[in-house]
Image (spheres, helix red, strand yellow):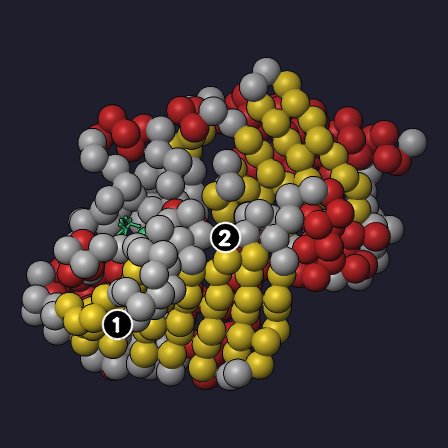
């Protein structure tokens, strides 16, 4: 099982940023209102994600580290309409097989309660001991890949690894305006984002994460047709120094990279004669969960739409209209 976990880890855990992504997804799934991400040395020395979510009970703690143990779906049918970000029950098992992982959690409102479990790359029944913690969970991952030197060798500089972590953090903070977020690196607080789901709060967050210039040169849109809703911000070409990598697309709150989506957006941009411009955007597509399949890839970055053509046409025509009007 340890080897199987390490192999699975190869798919899910590539670098500190992938650990952050998985831990934060768990925190979101636990219904947290506030999530703190703290790193040392770009995450290669340590990564800690602390949340105020539902917590994990004493009996479930060791189980949460074992492979294919998920509390999120009970049947294959449920997988069809999965709303949680996790559902494969692989992340914690994989991460703990290639790091020194400590999990402290409390399901009780009493901060004197709580339990701790540690795993150090070895396959053995993790021991549970009492450890006080406010309601919620803290997961600390130290010395990533300490026992898989071949993979450790592929880690880049602190700066590069932290860059990837920050990008993962940015995506996740953009996916949930209603959650408060903190990002710290080497004791320094880099982002402190208050929760808020109204327009002012959303734009404050966009500006904090993507820069004021992005927002000042972006068109806000919100369109709905036949059960599909598209809303968010699209950069206009007046933003001459748009960063090519500012492309964020979310499907039902899930970060998605999809060729069909990219194509529809590029096409709409080109059609409105924004020649040679690289589209920049933060867009949210909301659809019936039954029309998307998220179980395509372990990292869950890809989705498959049941009716890709329809989604493509909706995106294209929505953006085409909005950009055309802005241009006129
Ligand atoms: P998955 O998210 O696919 O279910 P994981 O390996 O990421 O699998 O997590 C295993 C289980 O541990 C989850 O199903 C959940 O029950 C529990 N868990 C993990 N992290 C948290 C957290 N931050 N808060 C509450 N429960 C958690
Ligand atoms: Mg998970």
Q: Earlier in the sequence, mark 2 or mark 1?
A: 2
Looking at the rendered structure, the secondary structure element under dot 1 is loop
Judging depth in this view, the residue of 235 and 191 nearest the camera is 191
Q: What's the mark number on residue 71?
A: none
- Residue 317's place in the image compared with 40, above or below, is above
- The residue drawn where x is 19% and y is 76% is 120
Judging depth in this view, the residue of 53 and 316 nearest the camera is 53
- Residue 40's place in the image compared with 123, above or below, is below
- The residue drawn where x is 82% and y is 38% is 273
Tell me the distance, in whole angstroms, between the alpha carbons under discs 2 and 1: 22 Å
Image side of residue 267 versus residue 163, left or right? right
Image side of residue 213 versus residue 130, left or right? right
Residue 96 in sight: no
Residue that numbered label 1 is attached to: 131
Crowd band around label 1 with a 10 angstrom C-alpha radius: few (<14), some (14–19), many (20+) = some
Q: Nearer the viewer, mark 2 or mark 1?
A: 1
Q: What's the mark number on residue 33?
A: 2
Look at the image and tell me in which quarter the N terminus lies: bottom left
Judging depth in this view, the residue of 321 and 79 nearest the camera is 79
Looking at the rendered structure, the secondary structure element under dot 2 is loop
Q: Position of residue 58 (x, y in %)?
A: 18, 58
- The residue drawn where x is 18% and y is 54% is 60
Residue lying farthest right? Answer: 328
Q: Position of residue 261 (x, y in %)?
A: 56, 37
Q: Position of residue 142 (x, y in %)?
A: 32, 78
- The residue drawn where x is 41% and y is 66% is 49
């Amino acid at each position: 099982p340890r080897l199987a976990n390490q192999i699975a880890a190869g798919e899910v855990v590539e670098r500190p940023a992938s650990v952050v992504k998985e831990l934060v997804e768990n925190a979101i799934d636990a219904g947290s209102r506030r999530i703190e991400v703290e790193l040392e040395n770009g995450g290669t020395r340590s990564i800690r994600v602390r949340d105020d979510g539902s917590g994990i009970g004493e009996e479930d703690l060791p189980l949460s580290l074992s492979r294919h143990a998920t509390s999120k779906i009970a049947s294959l049918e449920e997988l069809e309409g999965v709303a949680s970000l996790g559902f494969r029950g692989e992340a914690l098992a994989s991460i703990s097989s290639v790091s020194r992982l400590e999990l402290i959690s409390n399901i009780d409102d009493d901060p004197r309660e709580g339990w701790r479990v540690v795993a150090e790359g070895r396959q053995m029944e993790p021991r549970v001991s009492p450890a006080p913690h406010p309601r919620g969970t803290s997961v600390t991952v130290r010395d990533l890949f300490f026992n898989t030197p071949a993979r450790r060798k592929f880690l880049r500089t602190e700066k590069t690894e932290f860059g990837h972590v920050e990008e993962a953090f940015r995506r996740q903070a953009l996916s949930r305006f209603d959650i408060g977020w903190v990002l710290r690196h080497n004791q320094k607080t880099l982002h402190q984002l208050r929760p808020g789901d109204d327009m002012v709060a959303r734009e404050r967050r966009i500006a904090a994460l993507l820069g004021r210039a992005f927002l000042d040169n972006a068109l806000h849109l919100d369109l709905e047709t036949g059960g599909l809703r598209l809303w968010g911000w699209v950069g206009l070409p007046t933003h001459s120094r748009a960063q090519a990598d500012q492309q964020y697309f979310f499907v039902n709150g899930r970060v998605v990279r999809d060729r069909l989506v990219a194509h529809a957006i590029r096409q709409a941009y080109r059609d409105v004669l924004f020649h040679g411009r690289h589209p920049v955007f933060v867009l949210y597509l909301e659809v019936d969960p039954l029309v998307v399949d998220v179980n395509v890839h372990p990292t869950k970055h890809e989705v498959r739409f049941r009716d890709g053509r329809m989604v493509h046409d909706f995106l294209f025509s929505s953006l085409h209209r909005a950009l055309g009007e802005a241009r006129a």
